[in-house]
Amino acid sequence: MIGRKKELEIIKDCMKSDRSRLIVVYGRRRVGKTFLVREAFNYKFTFTHTGLEDGNFNEQLSAFWRSVKSQGEYNCQRPQNWFEAFDQLKNLISSSDDKRKTVFIDELPWMDTRNSGFVMALSDFWNGWASARTDVVMIVCGSAAAWMVKKVLHNRGGLFNRANRTICLQPFTLAECERYMESEGVAMDRKDIVSAYMVLGGSPYYWSLLEKGESLSQNIDRLFFSEGAELKDEFSKLYRSVFENPEPYVEIVTALGTKKAGLTRSELIATIPDAKSSGTLTQCLENLERSGFIRRYSEPGKTCRGSIYQLVDNLTLFYFRFVRDYNGRDTMHWSHLIRDQKRVSWEGIAFERVCLLHSWQIKKALGISGVASEESAWRCLPSPELAKGAQIDLVIDRADRVTNLCEMKFASEQYSISKDEADEMRRKTAAFKLSTGTRNPCHVTYVTTYGVQKGKHSSVMQSQVTMDDLFAE
């Protein structure tokens, strides 16, 4: 298995425990939750079941009954409610000869249909029976992070504070994607891996669809633009799988997709004509952040009340720019855009997002991974003091009283800083100091694919990070 060492150790510790354990696993669609659990248990469970996508109460209950029946309770009758269903599960577990009774319920949120009493019955099963034993390890898993947190982790009823271990499964890093491609025999250099990450993000399933023998452009064409393309409708499937009512979430990410630096909450309300109530908008933003679609940051010198929300999900950004309005006529659409300014412009923005998702690797390359710091972005609008606005996508404010202002550039060769760009960086640095009032020395840091070419204007830069540094583990 690629990566997941910490997660496997958590599961291993629970299996060694002398008490029953409840493990909660959640993360976005296609991130590898089911694969992790199945691999950790070598595909052997006392009982396993997966909820039905879009199934109603009767369909969910019948499917659970069939799973119980086929895995040990051969003569049980169809239950009338979830309490009876979990009673049948108790009988199955009690009759098992397994030393540790392992129960894996996947896509748990799908099973909680309206007014079904599912969560109450699950709570009764765990609190009133399983947790009183010493031999049950139960793993519940779901893609709907908001549901998993609200109904299980932060449940105000019987499941409150009952989870013994929680695994929020994260997407692969660049290094893990590289190792995965090597294991699959797909030949890709690091620039191709970064380019693929710009489109696919770190979801292992998407990477599993890349075929060896095809160039990256051919792979992207096949997955998004060919007839019957497998990922053409992934955007809508993704948001439907994560959020029970996806419409307000799609409205928010659509608004954020138009602004590279992000929007404040008040700006979002002004942008979305039918914005929900303040409380609902806050909940949607929290759920989007928890699910990894957006990030929230406060500009240096400002409080959380001035938080800015920024879309950082690679697949969503790619969908908005290239897939949403695709007319379906050019099956080699991506290949034909290889030198198009629209693609070049997108690559610059997408590379910035990849860098933001690898800020730890940037800090390591700068030799400050052990220094406490806060990562944010910064922007300012034109004002009497600052004739032009300015923006910095990654600011690393360090406890050792140095601030790194990071400039990200995606290029096919060593990057050359022009005189105009050097002057602009000096202007942005001065604007940052004036706007934030910081007294820290500000170090301009360039993050590029192949480094910065030494030249007349490269002295504006105090440090640099290359693409290879982003692959650190």
Image (tube, rainbow, N blue to C red):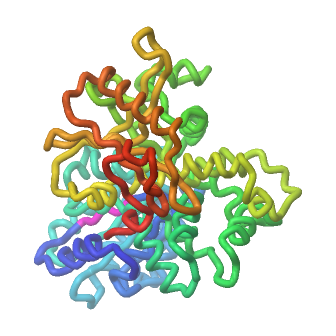
Quadrant in the picture for residue 45:
bottom left
How many numbered callouts? 0
Classify the position of the N terminus by image quarter: bottom left
Camera-side residue of 8 and 453:
453
Relative horizontal placement of residue 99, taking residue 66 as reference (left or right): left
Magenta residues, start to end = 22-26
24 in magenta: yes
Classify the position of the C terminus by image quarter: bottom left
Q: Position of residue 53 (x, y in %)?
A: 57, 60
Q: Position of residue 216 (x, y in %)?
A: 66, 71
Camera-side residue of 409 and 29:
409
Q: Residue at x 30, y 26 (%)?
A: 433
Residue that extends furthest to the bottom in the rendered view of this protein? 97
Camera-side residue of 258 and 69:
258
Question: Magenta part mainly helix, strand or loop?
Answer: strand
Q: Residue at x 77, y 45 (%)?
A: 325
Q: Vertically, is 79 above or below 396?
A: below
